[in-house]
Image (spheres, rainbow, N blue to C red):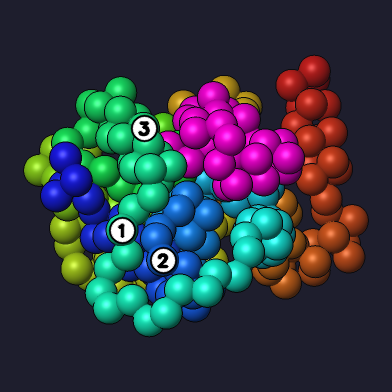
Amino acid sequence: MRERFSDRARHAMALANQEAARLKHSDLTPAHLMLGLIAEGECVATLALRVLDVNLDEVRAKVSARMAKGAAGDVIGRRAQSEELRAVVNQAIEEARKFHHRYVGTEHLILGLLAHGESIPALVLRELGVDLNRLREQTLALLRSSIDPSHDLAHSRHGEFEWVHQQELAKAFRSTTFWHTMILAVDSANRMGAGEIQPVHLLLAVLRDSSNGLGDLLAEKGVSVDWLRERLAAGKQA
């Protein structure tokens, strides 16, 4: 199964190795992997955490604060995985099997990290209110929506994902802001029990995303998440 790591999972591991080198550590640990996943960027693992309102900069700071700087000399090539990291990887493989996936992606790695209860990342994530079952549910919701065109599932031959084979669409949807908004829209639809994304879910996503200026402009006009939810509730009662 290890040779079936997705490109993003391999990249996260490579970035973890760089973190270990930067800190002069002789082996790879779960903490390095957490930093590698954050550095990887717009992968399923980090997107799922963002939807759960986890501040990745805060995670990085808290994880880094618990890591001591090492005294190892220059290590050529890849560092050996610590026993703790091997346990995390094995748990990630098990998570992939639970999902009936024949590959290991970043989503499985983050679940493996959280499931390994005494690792630094697990302690930090729990401290920030991340629950394993909730993270697993959110991950499944993202994968069902197939909203990450660079994900391995997008390159499978299953019919529901074949649309992302079209290079034109892949180029059109490069914007990370677009995907973040879509993820929030999917989350809003799931919370409201909707079977598909409607315009109201997109509007809620825009209002929930504090990183875009559009939400601020709408707020200036009195359009907020609470206002919209009140209007929706009033419409249902009418």
Amino acid type, mark 3: Gln
Residue neighbourhood size for the residue with mark 3, other residues' Cα within 10 Å, grouped as few (<14), some (14–19), many (≥20): many
Q: Name the secondary structure under disc 2.
A: loop
**Which callout, 3 or 1, points at the residue further toward the start of the chain?**
1
Rounded to the nearest angstrom, the CA distance separating label 3 from label 1 is 18 Å
The reply to whether residue 144 is in sight is: no
Residue where numbered disc 3 is placed: 91
Amino acid type, mark 2: Ser
**Which callout, 3 or 2, points at the residue further toward the start of the chain?**
2
Residue drawn 72% across the image and 43% down it: 128
Q: Nearer the viewer, mark 3 or mark 2?
A: 2
What is the chief secondary structure element of the magenta stretch?
A: helix
Residue where numbered disc 2 is placed: 26
The correct choice, above or below, for 98 with respect to 186 in the image is above
Residue where numbered disc 1 is placed: 80
Residue extending furthest toward the left: 157
What range is drawn magenta here?
Answer: 112-139
Query: Are the residues tagged 1 and 2 within 8 Å (C-beta)?
Result: yes
Amino acid type, mark 1: Ala
